[in-house]
Image (cartoon, coloured by chain):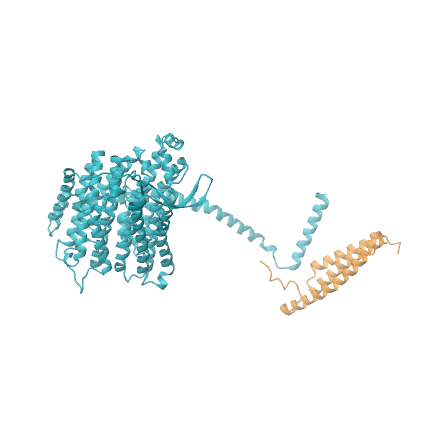
Amino acid sequence: MSIYSYIALIPLAPLAGFVILGLFGRKYFNKSAGIIGTCILGLSAFLSLATAFQYFFVDGKKDGIFHQLIPLKYSWLQFSPNISIDMGAVLDPLSVMMLVVVSFVSLMVHIFSLGYMKGEDRFATYYAFLSLFTFSMLGLVLSINIFQIYMFWELVGVSSFLLIGYYYEKPAAVAAAKKAFIVTRFADLGFLIGILILSFHAETLDFQTLISRLTDPQSSQYLSITTASFFGITMLTWGLVLVFIGGAGKSAMFPLHIWLPDAMEGPTPVSALIHAATMVVAGVFLVARLFPVFVFDHAALFVVTYIGAFSALLAAVIACAQTDIKRVLAYSTMSQIGYMMFALGVSGKGGEDGLGYMASMFHLFTHAFFKSLLFLGAGAVIHLVHSNDMKDMGGLRKYMPITHITFLIACLAIAGIPPFAGFFSKEEILLATFHANKLVFCIALFTSGLTAFYMFRLYFSIFWKKEALLHGEHHNEGTLSMKIPLLILGSCALLAGFVPISSLVTSDGAELETHINILFSLTPVLFGIAGILLALNLYKTENDKPQKIANVMGGFYKAAYKKFYIDEIYLFLTQKIIFNLIGKPAAWFDKNIVDGIINKMAGGTAIISEQIKGIQSGKVQAYALYFFLGIIGLSALFIYILN
Amino acid sequence: MNGIPLTHILFVSTALFFIGMYGFFTRRNMITILMSVELILNSVNINFVAFNKYLYPENLDGVFFTIFIITIAAAEAAVAIAIIINLYRSHHSVDVEEAGELKY
């Protein structure tokens, strides 16, 4: 077991990077901070890959099943002999895969930022924050108990807040950072209550013990959590749904998705890291981590399925109408996370039933590569054009051939065209859904067509459409450090589909047979191609067809453009209802009752002291008189009364 | 000597004590205040000697105390006069009403 003890370094190296760069970076090595941060992360990424190799191919497997290993465990807070909070690291297929994804994508983002963020005033701070974020995310995936995951969960929230608000001079960025923090924090409230419910009934915080107790119908803990109920719903369902709400907040599921598009105010590489590949899949990861318990509760899985499917569809529709390229990508992220969620929702445990779980993890894996590639490509485009709006773009394929090709690969991957990565994972998801839930299958199929459409709308608008209107002396794609990650991620987006996730990451650790069913695959691929052709027809050259279609759609188009007014509904709810009905009375109470009592007490003391301060006149003889009178009084007291 | 009862002597010492007290509270001149304090001390001395003489003639404790108090009073007078001189230097007066700065 101890051969894995080096994995403590994987999260701790970025933490060291954060401390060094955060404390001394701006003063001593503002210029070299990028190199330092990247090297440290390179170490983490290397160790992650080594761990993955060691675990998957050398000694993780026993009797054909991947077992959970706990190479590190320290008791941190001992509350009672039975309950303690431990810190440690867990190795199972899920966490190892996430380690690789997080550290690899983070490394690419670090390299890309070398060029993208060059010359920034707070360059070292940026890298310090990136390191902090990577540390929290790596710590999160390695967590051995539910309390540890909650701690890292909040750290992820804080570091994403810092990164979104990196351009703190921009009011929009500050607002976006606040919004992201408040919305996810609000969702975390659900998560916390869920943790309390689950761990109260399971009488442990440890994942392994919790899962084994809550999945054993004979155990007393299982009986207690299924018999206790609140509003006619068992505590098990409540706990799981509340945990899922926490996950939905981080993963931007409807109706807690509103922070994700705004979070695009951060630097683009940050969007690639946080809002595409790592942080937003934390929710999926959480559900996957507790999946053995979720399987036991159909109601909770039902919620996961339908929230996921609805978010996937809603986000895809909104993405079709957006013009800010980063927002399109943000909504496509939300849509793809929705895929992962409902794939988990329709899954069962073990054998063929576990297809959904495997597919979800597979999609998480491939999505991380092509989505971060899309964001980094968009970052390169924005770096060149200095605008986020696709109206300002067009015809860029001549100026940035590498970005163009890699972006195209990523678009094909997300659209699910074989043999790109997205095809395989999406295929598995659709297959799993087809067997489990026909309605969700139809939604998923339609959404995959929409995905192809809006991604190629984006692609054609950026790289074709019209002749580029760039003016200025030199136009190049940016530094070598920006091109290398694009190329690496591009090849990953091409090849990640061939990684045999089905034999590595499954719901029960055993290998799962999968086979591509040509006839079944035909439909989604046709949907994808139809979407691409539609986009080709509408956006390849400049014409008025999109405008006409928008006019025909009328109100629906406008609603999609306005993101279905969900932000406005939230604003109405918070500003008109919550502020007026709860906030203002609470403020009044605080100002008049709580503060009032203290102020009145202080005022009373002041008045009394004003009245009696004359006694201290400065006249020595007066003092002597008081002293004398006091002695007389005391004498009288002792002689006549106390005697 | 034997004809004078103890109460007479105590009456004298009490009168002396309250005369001193009265002077202490009413006089504004530091030197007279000092003199009043001396009166109070001496009234106590009379008490000590009288009680010693009338109640425990075989002991000398009261007399010792009296001598002790006289010594202390001499030292105290020196300190008090030093304070009065400093007060005069800073306020050009030995009136305690003038030195009323230490107030609220």
User: Relative to residue A123, is residue A204 drawn left or right?
Assistant: right
A388 is higher (above) or lower (below) than A418? below
The one of A242 and A414 positioned closer to us in this rendering: A414
Chain that is orange in the image: B
User: Relative to residue A90, is residue A324 drawn left or right?
Assistant: left
Q: Is residue B69 visible?
A: yes
* x, y percent for residue A488: 22, 54
Q: Quadrant of the N terminus of chain A?
A: top left
Q: Quadrant of residue A192?
A: top left
Q: Quadrant of the C terminus of chain A?
A: top right
User: Relative to residue B92, is residue A590 drawn left or right?
Assistant: left
The one of A166 and A420 positioned closer to us in this rendering: A420
Q: Which residue appears at 28% of the width and 52% of the height?
A: A104
The one of A551 and A633 positioned closer to us in this rendering: A551
* x, y percent for residue A229: 37, 31
* x, y percent for residue A514: 21, 39
Colour seen for chain A: cyan
Q: How many marks?
A: 0
* x, y percent for residue B96: 66, 63
Q: Is residue A122 visible?
A: no
